Image (spheres, grey):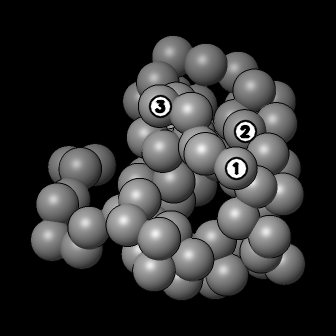
Amino acid sequence: MQLTKRETQILHLITYEYSTDEIASRLFLSKYTILSHRKNILRKLKARNTAGVVRKGIQLGYVKLGICYQK
């Protein structure tokens, strides 16, 4: 399953240690919307936790290290 553009954006922010609240604030979305996206990312990447999401995101090419979003 492919990640949506928004899910990919959220995955990048997760990779760079942004919290759910920080992601919501940065993207002008509800924290509950972010939680829903996180749940969908976990399911689509078949990961068990955040560390698995980051690892699989890198392996599958969704995340390229070195491109950092400023806090």
The amino acid type of the residue labelled 3 equals Lys
The residues tagged by marks 2 and 3 sit, at their Cα atoms, a distance apart of 11 Å
Going from the N terminus, do you reach mark 2 or mark 1 first?
1
Q: Which mark is residue 37?
A: 2
Q: Which mark is residue 53?
A: none
Residue beneath disc 3: 5
- Tell me if residue 9 can be seen: yes
* The one of 10 and 63 positioned closer to us in this rendering: 63
Residue 27 in percent (x, y) is at 46, 24
Residue 3 in percent (x, y) is at 59, 43
Residue beneath disc 1: 1
**Outermost residue, left side:** 66
Rendered residue at 43%/40% (across/down)? 9
Rendered residue at 61%/45% (across/down)? 2
- Tell me if residue 38 can be seen: no
Q: Quadrant of residue 62?
A: bottom left
For label 2, the SS is helix
* The one of 34 and 5 positioned closer to us in this rendering: 5
For label 1, the SS is loop
Task: Mark 2 vs mark 1: give the one in front.
Answer: 1
Going from the N terminus, do you reach mark 2 or mark 3 first?
3
Rendered residue at 81%/30% (across/down)? 32
Location of residue 15 with respect to 10 vertically, above or below: below
Crowd class of label 1 (few under 14; some 14 to 19; many from 20; radius 10 Å): few
| Tag 1 near tag 3, CB within 8 Å | no
Crowd class of label 2 (few under 14; some 14 to 19; many from 20; radius 10 Å): some
The residues tagged by marks 1 and 3 sit, at their Cα atoms, a distance apart of 13 Å
Q: Is residue 33 left or right of residue 25?
A: right
Q: Is residue 18 left or right of residue 45?
A: left
Location of residue 8 with respect to 5 vertically, above or below: below
The amino acid type of the residue labelled 1 equals Met
